[in-house]
Amino acid sequence: MAILIWFGFRITYLHEGLEPKVVHRDIKSSNILLDKRWSSKVSDFGLAKLLGSDSNYVTTRVMGTFGYVAPEYASTGMLNERSDVYSFGVLIMEIISGRCPVDYARPPTEVNLVEWLKKMVSNRDYEAVLDPKLPEKPSSKALKKALLVALRCVDPDSQKRPKMGHAIHMLEVDDFPYREDRRTLRPCQGSPLEKSRKPVTESGHSSCYDGNSSTAATTPSRFQ
């Protein structure tokens, strides 16, 4: 979960630490790179779009990876940072369950990971969603917290999804109340959000970003 949280910090910096903000548009498990210290990096900015502070969304041709794309973006082409939040929610579900976002080899009711997990949580069948290959099982409290954060991130109503920074905060805190926390969030010490806002330019290169500098180093968009 630590890898996932730090990956979320990187995305939060793209959304809230830059002007204009950067919408990654292709958040998925294969775009998380790990260094020798298991520190996560954000990879592949080939589909990224810039969103100015005076714009609520940008209209663009629908791109991304099937299963991770937010439904409102897929149907209208209207993109903003909430689309990344949806993809992050799917990523949480994927890591917890060990399942692909869409898997046609499974029974019809289990093909779509988001819909299957919603049903399992509504039936309070939390333990059944865990990846059996996990070396250690999380506590029941930690599992419920992660699942509920994931479900909030994939809310069909994009306006009800938390901001990325809020989602990461909910994953971090021990006393997560399972309800809307409207307190103003502050960046954790050492997080990318502590850095000042930097101007950015849009690039079509496949890049890796680790939140430790204002530049991106070109790297293949796969695990090393």
Image (tube, rainbow, N blue to C red):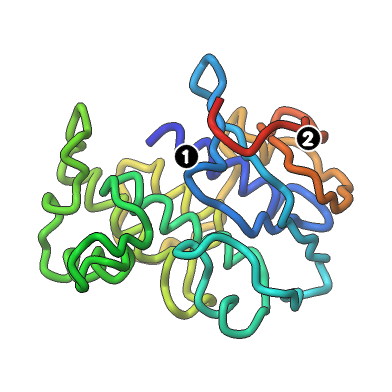
Q: How far apart are the alpha carbons under marks 1 and 2?
A: 20 Å
Which quadrant holds the C terminus?
top right
Question: Does residue 161 lie above or below 97 as drawn?
Answer: below
Choose between 132 and 151: the one closer to the eye: 132
Instruction: State the image quarter where residue 140 is shown.
Output: top left
SS assignment at label 2:
loop
Determine the image quadrant of residue 22. Answer: bottom right
Q: Percent position (x, y) of residue 77?
A: 66, 79
Three-letter residue code for mark 2: Ala
Reading the image, the residue beneath label 2 is 216
The picture places residue 150, in percent across and down from the top left corner, at 37, 58
- Residue 31 as seen in the image, left or right of residue 108: right
Outermost residue, bottom side: 76
Identify the residue under disc 1. Answer: 5
Q: Using residue 88 as the reference point, say whether residue 193 is left or right of it.
A: right
Quarter of the image that includes the N terminus: top left
How packed is label 2: few (under 14 Cα within 10 Å), some, or many (20 or more)? some
- Vertical order, 122 against 32 (above or below): below
Q: Nearer the viewer, residue 57 or 216?
A: 216
What type is the residue that disc 1 sits on? Ile
Report the residue at 65% width, 73% height from top: 62
Answer with left or right where residue 184 lies relative to residue 89: right
